[in-house]
Amino acid sequence: MNPLRKKSLENLFNKQPKYFSSDKIHSEIFADNVFNDASLEKYLNKEALSQITEAISKGSKINRSLADQIASSMKAWAMSKGVTHFTHWFQPLTGGTAEKHDAFFDLLPSGKPMERFDANELVQQEPDASSFPSGGIRNTFEARGYTAWDPTSPAFILGKTLCIPTIFVSYTGEALDYKTPLIKSIQTLDQCATEVCKYFDKNVSKVFPTLGWEQEYFLIDRALASSRPDLIITGRTLFGHQPSKGQQLDDHYFGAIHPRVIAFMQELEYEAMLLGIPVKTRHNEVAPGQFELAPIFEEANLSVDHNSLIMDIMQRIAAKHDFIVLFHEKPFEGINGSGKHNNWSLETSTGVNLLSPGKTPMSNLQFLTFFINTIAAVLSHESLLIASIVSASNDHRLGADEAPPAVLSVFIGKQLTAVLEDLEHVSKGKLSPEEKTDLKLNVIGKIPEILLDNTDRNRTSPFAFTGNKFEFRAVGSKSNCARSITALNTMVAEQLQKFSIAVDQLIEEKEMKKDDAIFNVLRDNIKSIKNILFEGDGYSEDWKATAKKRGLSHHKNTPDALKAYVSKSSIALFGQMEVFSEREVRARYNVDLQEYILKIQIESRTLGDIARNHIIPTGIKYQNILIENVKGLKEIYGSAYEKHAAVQLKIIERISGHIEAISDGITKMIDTRKASNSIEDKFEKAQAYCLKVLPFLNEIRYHCDKLELVVDDDLWPLAKYRELLFCR
Ligand code: ADP
Ligand code: MG
């Protein structure tokens, strides 16, 4: 047996959970390692404190002297906790996080050593960051990229390093990360949504999106995983026959959590608490070896940072517990993959959730306004929303039976469907007092504060209203949430802007009362959004046909879906809402296409190597054992040997057949790869990888998995599905 596979299996059953204990309860340690309002209060004088609070809430500039004061308090606070280094922490387009540490330590010209950290270091840095994906925005001769402090997300301590959340932009000002456009989309959404809120409550001065992500992941024993180069390199298994037991008994979902896993979760939660990440929920997911983690929702920018941060921490803590974490959307064939539901809503400076029905008809009209406009925005830009969640890895999951269907639709539940039907029949123009009273009393006045459908919701819907928020379920587990949330914020901002323009026009030109105008515009919106509303089974064939008739786009693969990024309407949307310039949108499109190409290329190479260097030789080894056996039988039985060696002979032949198919497949795959590599146009190249190279992966895998079933278990080099999924 492969010594790695053998040793890890032998050791597995002696592994004890590494329980983590602390005498502190979570509320005592929450955000201890975060430079938040409480720390600011402790270190800053009153005037500085009110200046920074105002700058953060209004997004205004922080002057040099204030930045100096903040830097010096940050340093004092961090050093009191034993911190020696600082870093600008950012989220480049690699999908991960980036950090480059510098010491506080410095030498004065006199040679005297000291600890230094002032506004210069806090506000802006120029990491030598020429190697991050830029989609053509940066040439190597002007490779400079800048990180700039994001004061809306507090600094935190990781190990002995002070991490300062930053945006990452090019010398010429274009975004090179996920945070820059996210912040812009939050600002534009704030403006447009606050404008609409003023119809209902003049006291609202700010609106911000909230995000609560639900992170799914697999935990696999580290030693076992190390015998799988495919898992280590690509994050998913490129081989592996189905085990006889997968998830068909549904016995993992919400089951008792394994002691080694609980030990991991406890330590993770402790670390998350110190960093101010309000983790709340943990449970076993559907697939064996799969789990979920969810926090209490937060303001979207902070929530995105927390998701990126926790994905890093999870890997680190998993290693301590002899696990690896898989964030890939489909690490194992034949069992559920992982997603990251993005729960999204809008909250006002007055503490109102705009997607939660209220107590009065007026607050419900406000709720309906935001509810209907969100759906209208999704309808206008459904293909862009899909483009914001696709990737080589999420392609394996989308459209499969366990995951959201490949067509975007919105589920709203029975009660709200009925409300929309009533509103659709509101008269055109000014409403009579009777009609208005009737509407207020019998339609919007009747929306219960807590919607029943909240508990009875459609699990097959990719974008579902769940009582007080929308839940975008198509987001991949590996993805940075900022990608989809930026798109969603921007389209909703645009729609809200259109809405207030339409309402104001009716008020001014038709001399309508405010609520008449709102009813009129909503009624028109309801007529069009019906196109994307769907309450039925999203997996059914019927729906696919209906969706096609409705003109909704059907996601087939990533290159195809990505085209929506550079459509006229997306470029106009991002440009008008000042989230991306056309150059930036095109750059992102290029980065995504390039990532797609590289991911498939790496998978294809890894698969070719393992099949040639591990699997074919294993097949031959076993075949040789059988040949020896047949020779022995011939010695004993002479010409009658065939009767006794019938099974062996059949297996020998079968092995030859599979080996030949594997070897042929690899040769053809390499030729196809070469041909694809010579294509200049990025989109066409991505398509070639998708339509021509990718099919070989399945074909070669098929024969390798068949060999796995035939070859002596003792000889098989790769840890098997049953071991990876069930042994811990
Ligand atoms: P599930 O979808 O697993 O049934 P819940 O519906 O209880 O779970 O909540 C899922 C997530 O929704 C949680 O992470 C929670 O923080 C988040 N959430 C709840 N309210 C809001 C909101 N107003 N805005 C954003 N996220 C929210
Ligand atoms: Mg959910």
Image: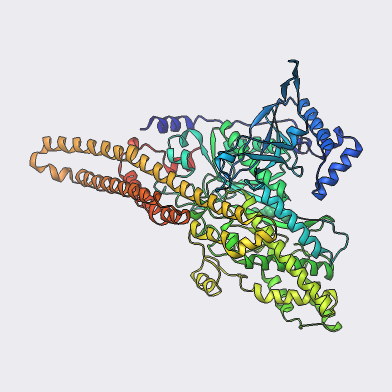
Give the residue at x 71% y 78%: 424
Give the residue at x 67% y 77%: 527
Q: How is the image coloured?
A: rainbow
- Residue at the far top: name it: 111
Q: State the residue in front, 668 or 435.
A: 668
Relative vertical location of residue 330 with respect to residue 39 in this rendering, above or below? below
Q: State the residue in front, 516 or 23.
A: 516
Please state the quadrant of the image where ligand 1 appears.
Answer: bottom right
Q: State the residue in front, 479 or 320.
A: 479
- Residue 37 percent location from the top left of the image: 82, 40
- Residue 252 percent location from the top left of the image: 54, 48
- Residue 65 percent location from the top left of the image: 84, 35
Q: Does the image show residue 239?
A: no
- Residue 5 percent location from the top left of the image: 41, 33
Q: Does the image show residue 291?
A: yes
For this view, does 171 lie left or right of residue 708?
Answer: right
Give the residue at x 23% y 35%: 625
- Residue at the far left: name it: 639
Give the residue at x 56% y 58%: 387
- Residue at the far front: name it: 141
**Residue 217, image quadrant:** top right
The mark total stands at 0
The quarter of the image holding the N terminus is top left
Relative vertical location of residue 103 with respect to residue 538 in this rendering, above or below? above
Q: State the residue in front, 579 or 291.
A: 579
